[in-house]
Amino acid sequence: MQQRSQTGALLTGLRCLPDFAFRAWVLVSAGLVLLYIFGPLTHALLAPEWSVFLETLKDREVLRSIGLSLYTSAMAACIALVFGTPLAYVLARKQFYGKKLVESIIDLPIMIPHPVVGIVLLSVAGRNHPFGELLQSVGITLMGTVTGIVAVLVFVGMPFFVNTVKAGIEGVPERYENVSRSLGADRRATFFRILLPLTWRYLLVGMIMCMARALSEFGAIVIVAYHPMVAPVLMYERFTAYGLTYSQPVAVLLILVSLVFFLFLRVVSQPDRRQR
Amino acid sequence: MGPTGSGKTLLLESLAGLVRPDSGTVVVDGRSITALPPEKRSMGLVYQDHALFPNLSVFDNIVYGQRYHGIDRHEGKRYAVELMDMLDISALADRYPENLSGGEKQRTALARALACKPAIVLLDEPLSSLDPQFREGLRRNLKRLHEATEAIFFMVTHDFVDALSLADRAAVIREGKIEQIGDTADIFHRPVTTFIADFVGMKNIFPATPDNGLRELTHAAVRHRGVPFDGSGHIALRPEDISLAPDNTHPHTMAGLPGTVRTIVREGFTWLAVVACSGVEIVARIDQRSLLNGVIQEGRTVYVGLDPENMHYIPKLPG
């Protein structure tokens, strides 16, 4: 009881804030948040010397690492698309016992410290584990391979994809699917003729989310596959070996490439005024 | 028909196969279809909110299901055009659902269900969401479509006027249970419960106790019904079947009882007069003329004409 009256008193007190004070709070907070994000980024973008930056652009190792980052993240996004979409559909449409548990499990990769992710994946795929033995018998290893990197990225990126797509599908009334089926279309036809056209933007945004998460992954990749080096790993190595001057340009390049890429995807996935 | 929340939509969805029943079977034409998925049931479904596919044009919406019913493209297109003509939406063929009015969406949804030539068309309160001036038009359309196609129309509604004007057979559902099934006229004239009596517009419902002022009439009504009278049950009477006159000049089939007008209430285009008479309150419908020439006024004495043939006796239900 006492707790409630204390909260109530607090809220009443806050509600008494004059309107201008509320608006000031909104503006100042928004400004601070934006400054906090843009400030360091702008500094990072403007810091490198031009000559060093140009040299970095021509550095084959840098270009290769950025290419690898993009490639592995895109692979992870595609895998999420193929395997994550059905799961997102089931979660959006079906009620079942233990659903909350399943949703929490899907969120786990977000919470687990990244090195732990790498360690867990390695131990499952390693020689001492039955599943790992199965993998190695078909020639699949995770340690130090591109496959390993992609495996890590799928693990950390999947929750972002599934949650985005699930929210998107929830936004499409189930009535449409019901009507489609009552008109004679089976589940497969309904999916491709009705659901997909109405949700493909969410699938795209889900892929963007997954890829964004994947591009920035470091801790898990370092454990599983330090080599071949993705961009964050290269940056780290250059920083420890040569310092800020030679690692910053790599960061700038990666930021620019990502910015262009995501901007492009956002534009493509935005519905035009008419359809909205 | 039944009030909101009685389970009408659920019933419809169970018939269509979109909701799996916990128990029981769905039998059509002697065949049990309970295990069939919706796409195999040949039942068109028209939702109250139309649910037109937003990513398809009106025409594409209409022909959507034809390919699953063995209708080839040519014949399908021809039939779709015919339906659009009948429903007066031919001009809208290339429009998208977001650019249609409520009535246009409703007609498109109808055309879409019928274009597949289903055996049964399920309609979920098709007239409820329409403006009153369009309801009459859609009722006529439904009647015409029903006559033109060979499909069975199965409609749920909370307005018994829809049932009266469109259906030969009806059922009343309340809180998940069917209370009466039969010919629509039968339900309209001889409801078996007081709830149904009220639902079909019998505003006057009172217990058939032998010692109320309507005693003679009550007995006559019970006799008319042909069942033994044990002092229980109710009498139900429509406002339209009551005659009000300033003096006791009623047709000889009616008995006239004196009463006082308590209040006059407007209802739509007519009025209802609430008259205190013989210890009960009777609601009678009066026309504009009686009102305008001052014959019926609040506080005035009037004579209430009641015909036992129009007084419906509802025996108390067992259990």
Image (cartoon, grey):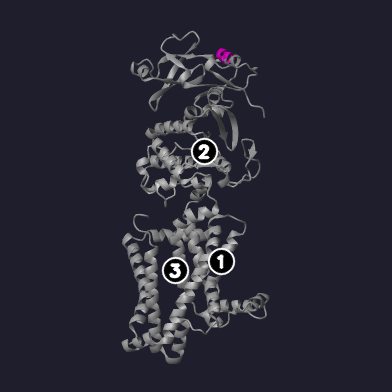
Q: Is residue A119 visible?
A: yes
Residue pictured at 55% horizontal, 83% vertical: A144
Task: Please name the amino acid that badge 3 sits on.
Answer: Ile
Of A239 and B124, which appears nearest the observer?
A: B124
Q: Is residue B282 magenta?
A: no
Circles 1 and 3, Cβ within 8 Å, touching? The answer is no
Of B36 and A234, which appears nearest the observer?
A: B36
In this picture, which residue range is highlighted in magenta?
Answer: B215-220
Q: Which callout, 1 or 2, points to the residue nearer the camera?
A: 2
Separation of disc 2 and disc 3 at Cα? 44 Å
Q: Chain of mark 1?
A: A
Task: Please name the amino acid that badge 2 sits on.
Answer: Val
Residue B121, label in figure: 2
| SS assignment at label 3 | helix
Q: Residues within 10 Å of mark 1 (few under 14, many from 20)?
A: some
Confirm whether circles 1 and 2 share one chain: no
Separation of disc 1 and disc 2 at Cα? 42 Å
Q: Chain of mark 2?
A: B
Separation of disc 1 and disc 3 at Cα? 18 Å
Work out whether A268 lies above or below B151: below
Q: Main secondary structure of the magenta part?
A: helix
Residue bearing mark 3: A208
- Residue A110 coordinates in the image, percent (x, y): 52, 71
Residue pictured at 44% horizontal, 8% vertical: B249
Task: Please name the amino acid that badge 1 sits on.
Answer: Ile
Residue bearing mark 1: A106
- Residue A214 coordinates in the image, percent (x, y): 48, 74
Along the polypeptide, which appears first: circle 1 or circle 3? 1
- Residue A216 coordinates in the image, percent (x, y): 46, 76
Circles 2 and 3, Cβ within 8 Å, touching? The answer is no
Q: Chain of mark 3?
A: A
